[in-house]
RNA sequence: GGGCAAGUGGCGGAACUGGCAGACGCGCAGGUCUCAAAAACCUGAGGGGACUAUGUCCUCGUGUGGGUUCAAUUCCCACCUUGCCCACCA
């Protein structure tokens, strides 16, 4: 009987000793790069990791069987806040805490039987890795892609650090969920907006092999909108107001303007006008608060600025208002308002009794006179001078062109995505390699002086400013230019920098002269299959796509995109709830392995739900998997016991059926893994094969044995210890020789067994299936009818009635209608 | 408000390009073995109904209402619900 506690450690030892899963760059086989999102070394593996890594391992082991040289690396995303928190709480240095956790989790991964190439392991918190973060930073700094600016930033008071826009989830910190404040600080940014268009264009190449869901989310994040910037002169002043609009066709309907309370114009006016100053401070306060319940747009409020602007299309003077429904962080912080064609402007106009003027009407219809809302759709232009009668899109083009001639407008594209703020006021991260020299200004550290090492002798108290800022010998530096005393930057980089290019470092993790060798990367990249959680759809997966394009432009990689195929797996829950320490509902993988074995755990997690769905944990489901493995184990025992005579010999038909089922199963499992990526149905079809083999009368004959071997091979990506051990026993091989690297191949399928020459068709009369018939697959339509109509059973239904219609759907069904 | 995904038994879920809905597993019920239990194995089952009743048939049935089709879980239209993402984005 199958005993996981005995065979699993044994197989794992063999793999380890034989380096069974180390990538061989000299191999002639086609390469296949399978990547799983590397874990943060929090201390222990959880079920979410298990799911992620088992999916990755099924791919890896499957493609090895298919004859690929598979690269399946693993590493540690080991910079980040928890190490600092642990240091504060338990007085353990972050580095020690992190490295200890890594050691423990490595053992846990080994117990799962994941076939990693441990020779390419990396950890982002080690200087040999983060040195290259600094190197990339300097390259970007040289190209003007890394820059420093004063700006209002999202500040998490609990984490005492700034956050990127993407890290603020409905007004709260993505990590600790405390409310985010705004603060003005000098910070480092990466100009990801330069690549916004390239990131959007890149979607074309990903459409087929990335989930739609992820692409849609990214499209939302990028948030491209096309329109025009238009200049409105401010009446009676030399100044003007620049606005962005997606609807320049509605310019003739602009009856007022609105600027944000934070807009320079508002700030200037507030100095002289108390009413405006009061409104502005009140509005900003409300904005912070409305983050909490930002579901419903609040009622619009505003105050008249006292100024009028001049509409460039018709010279009309229109009032300028100040309102918080316009924000400073999108567009120009000022808008033209067309209440007839924008619902928000409409609401505002209603409240303050401003003019509403229709300038677009639906084609082939009158103007919508009911003033209960704005008409936001396309249509024909009216009340627009020379442009009347034009299609609004055409009108938009012409208006922009005409105004551009007078230097009053230009076509423009605006994006929702902002530059990536990477400064963090934290210790446990990559130091930003910059010094501030009183004479020479901001200077990048010389490349030969990299890495700027994190000091290990540091007090982490969790209060006040960044621990690095109070570390004297770290802060005191020499200017790379003049050699004079200078102050070192004490901010560290966002950890998303670390994970933006780790997949490339795996290709050459020990390189000390460059981030990686170009040729090695060219051979392995892009990643063929990436597996990870959907929660990274917008941050990690946008940052690393950006980083890849930067590396391409720097000549380091040759591909346009880092990840050719992406699979996002769902969460693992218990009774519908996410597992968490605070809820105390964690199922420990180690305990499950102890009780059921790693193979059962692996199979269960693959079988219980399709990979993208949420997976609810169930102990009884696991029992079912154990039953299945026991059944297979008994089948194998039968095959090796010579004295166990078959119940009775199988008939030729029965043998053919088993052959066909086995062949179909092999083909189906391959298809499910490689194309459908639906592992649950792959497992269920293997169960069907086992059911068929159990009821086969002549257990032990050649057909049955072949089916068993095929089964064990296709099972081996899912339950590798069990399948390999059983195969070795079955073949009477020296058990310690077997290593799954070259010994086995995915079974060849005899096409004849898959393509049926004789097929079963259904015969339907008046919508009811009345008979099934076996016909040669290539029979022509006419002969099919003749054969059907000659059938005795069919005749009874047709006799004495008039045939109205008949249809033959090839290889499937004959449908006859009679009256 | 916008976008995306999804709604199928008691549960997880299956169904290639429209072709016998509910594979496979869990749970459940009954049985075999046993002093008993566990394990294992076998059998049964979507709802409702009919009969000449242990087999055969009818009928309803994949969120709701329409449509296309000989045939719809699948395609089209409208709606409802849930989940996720975005959001005074100009």
Image (spheres, rainbow, N blue to C red):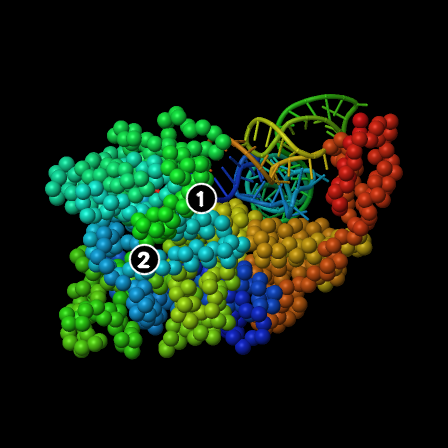
Whether label 2 touches label 1, CB < 8 Å: no
The answer to which image quadrant residue A702 occupies is bottom right
Point out the image quarter for the C terminus of chain A. top right
Relative horizontal placement of residue B8, taking residue A177 as reference (left or right): right
Residue at 79% x, 36% y is A806
Which chain letter goes with mark 1?
A
Residue drawn at point x = 42 percent, y = 50 percent: A219
Q: Examine the rendered structure and indicate whether residue A67 appears above or below residue A585.
A: below
Q: Residue at x 66, y 63 (%)?
A: A747
List the residue tagged with mark 2: A420
Dot 2 alpha-carbon crowd within 10 angstroms: few under 14, some 14 to 19, many 20 or more: some
Does residue A366 appear to the left or right of B24 in the view shown? left
Q: Is disc 1 placed on a helix, strand or loop?
A: helix
Q: Position of residue A181 (x, y in %)?
A: 23, 48
Which residue does the numbered mark 1 point to in the structure image?
Answer: A394
Viewer-closest of A465 and A167: A167
Picture quarter containing residue A466? bottom left
- Please, which residue is most extreme toward the front here? A386
């Amino acid at each position: 009987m199958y005993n996981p506690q005995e065979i699993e450690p044994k197989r794992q030892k063999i793999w380890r000793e034989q380096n069974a899963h180390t990538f061989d760059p000299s191999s002639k086989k086609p390469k296949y790069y399978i990547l799983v999102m590397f874990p943060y070394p929090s201390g222990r593996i959880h079920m979410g990791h298990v799911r992620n890594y088992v999916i990755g391992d099924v791919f890896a082991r499957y493609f090895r069987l298919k004859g690929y040289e598979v690269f399946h690396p693993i590493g540690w995303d080991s910079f980040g806040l928890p190490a600092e928190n642990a240091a504060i709480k338990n007085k353990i240095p972050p580095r020690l805490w992190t490295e200890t956790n890594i050691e423990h989790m490595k053992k846990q991964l080994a117990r799962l039987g994941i076939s990693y190439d441990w020779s390419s392991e990396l950890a982002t918190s080690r200087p040999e890795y983060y040195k290259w973060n600094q190197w990339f930073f300097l390259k970007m700094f040289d190209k003007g892609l890394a820059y420093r600016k004063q700006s209002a930033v999202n500040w998490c008071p609990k984490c005492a650090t700034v956050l990127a826009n993407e890290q603020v989830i409905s007004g709260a910190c993505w990590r600790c969920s405390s409310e985010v404040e705004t603060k003005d600080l000098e910070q480092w940014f990466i100009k990801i907006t330069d690549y916004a268009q390239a990131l959007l264009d890149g979607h074309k190449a990903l459409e087929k092999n990335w989930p739609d869901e992820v692409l849609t989310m990214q499209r939302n994040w990028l948030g491209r909108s096309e329109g025009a910037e238009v200049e409105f002169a401010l009446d009676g002043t030399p100044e003007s107001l620049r606005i962005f609009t997606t609807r320049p066709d509605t310019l003739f309907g602009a009856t007022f303007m609105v600027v944000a309370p934070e807009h320079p114009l508002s700030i200037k006016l507030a100095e002289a006008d108390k009413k405006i100053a009061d409104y502005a401070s009140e509005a900003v306060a409300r904005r912070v608060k409305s983050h909490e319940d930002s579901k419903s747009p609040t009622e619009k409020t505003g105050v008249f600025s006292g100024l009028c602007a001049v509409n460039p299309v018709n010279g009309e003077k229109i009032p300028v208002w100040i309102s918080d429904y316009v924000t400073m962080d999108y567009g120009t912080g000022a808008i033209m308002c067309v209440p007839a064609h924008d619902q928000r402007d409409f609401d505002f106009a209603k409240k303050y009794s401003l003019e509403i003027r229709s300038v677009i009407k639906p084609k082939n219809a009158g103007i919508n006179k009911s003033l209960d809302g704005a008409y936001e759709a396309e249509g024909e232009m009216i009340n627009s001078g020379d442009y009347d009668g034009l299609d609004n899109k055409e009108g938009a083009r012409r208006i922009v062109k005409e105004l551009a001639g007078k230097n009053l407008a230009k076509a423009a594209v605006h994006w929702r995505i902002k530059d990536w703020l990477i400064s963090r006021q934290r210790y446990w991260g990559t130091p930003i390699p910059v010094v501030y020299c009183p004479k020479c200004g901001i200077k990048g550290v010389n490349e030969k002086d990299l890495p700027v090492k994190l000091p290990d002798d540091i007090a982490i108290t969790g209060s006040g400013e960044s621990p690095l800022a109070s570390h004297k010998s770290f802060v005191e530096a020499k200017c790379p230019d003049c050699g004079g005393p200078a102050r070192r930057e004490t901010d560290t980089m966002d950890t998303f920098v670390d994970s933006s290019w780790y997949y490339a470092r795996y290709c050459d993790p020990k390189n000390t002269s460059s981030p990686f060798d170009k040729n090695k990367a060219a051979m392995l990249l892009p990643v063929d299959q990436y597996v990870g959680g959907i929660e990274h759809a917008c941050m990690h997966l946008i940052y690393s796509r950006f980083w890849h394009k930067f590396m391409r432009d720097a000549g380091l990689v040759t591909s346009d995109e880092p990840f050719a195929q992406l699979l996002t797996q769902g969460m693992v829950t218990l009774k519908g709830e996410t597992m968490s320490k605070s809820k105390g509902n964690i199922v420990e993988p180690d305990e499950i392995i102890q009780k059921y074995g790693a193979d059962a755990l692996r199979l269960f997690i693959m079988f219980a739900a399709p990979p993208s769905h949420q997976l609810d944990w169930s102990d009884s489901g696991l029992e079912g998997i154990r039953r299945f493995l026991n059944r297979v184990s008994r089948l194998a025992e039968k095959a090796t016991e010579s004295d166990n005579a078959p119940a009775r010999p199988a008939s030729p038909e029965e043998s053919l059926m088993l052959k066909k089922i086995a062949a179909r199963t092999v083909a189906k499992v391959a298809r499910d893994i490689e194309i459908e990526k639906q592992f649950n149905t792959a497992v269920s079809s293997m169960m069907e094969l086992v059911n068929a083999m159990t009821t086969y009368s002549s257990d032990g004959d050649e057909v049955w044995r072949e089916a068993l071997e095929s089964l064990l091979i296709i099972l081996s990506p899912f339950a590798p210890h069990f399948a390999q051990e059983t195969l070795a026993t079955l073949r009477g091989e020296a058990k310690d020789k077997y290593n799954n690297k070259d010994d086995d191949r995915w079974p060849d399928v005899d096409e004849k067994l898959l393509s049926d020459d004789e097929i079963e068709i259904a015969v339907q009369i008046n919508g009811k299936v009345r008979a099934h018939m076996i016909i040669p697959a290539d029979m022509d339509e006419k002969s099919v009818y003749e054969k059907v109509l000659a059938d005795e059973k069919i005749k009874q239904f047709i006799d004495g009635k008039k045939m109205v219609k008949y249809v033959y759907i090839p290889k499937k069904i004959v449908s006859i209608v009679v009256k």
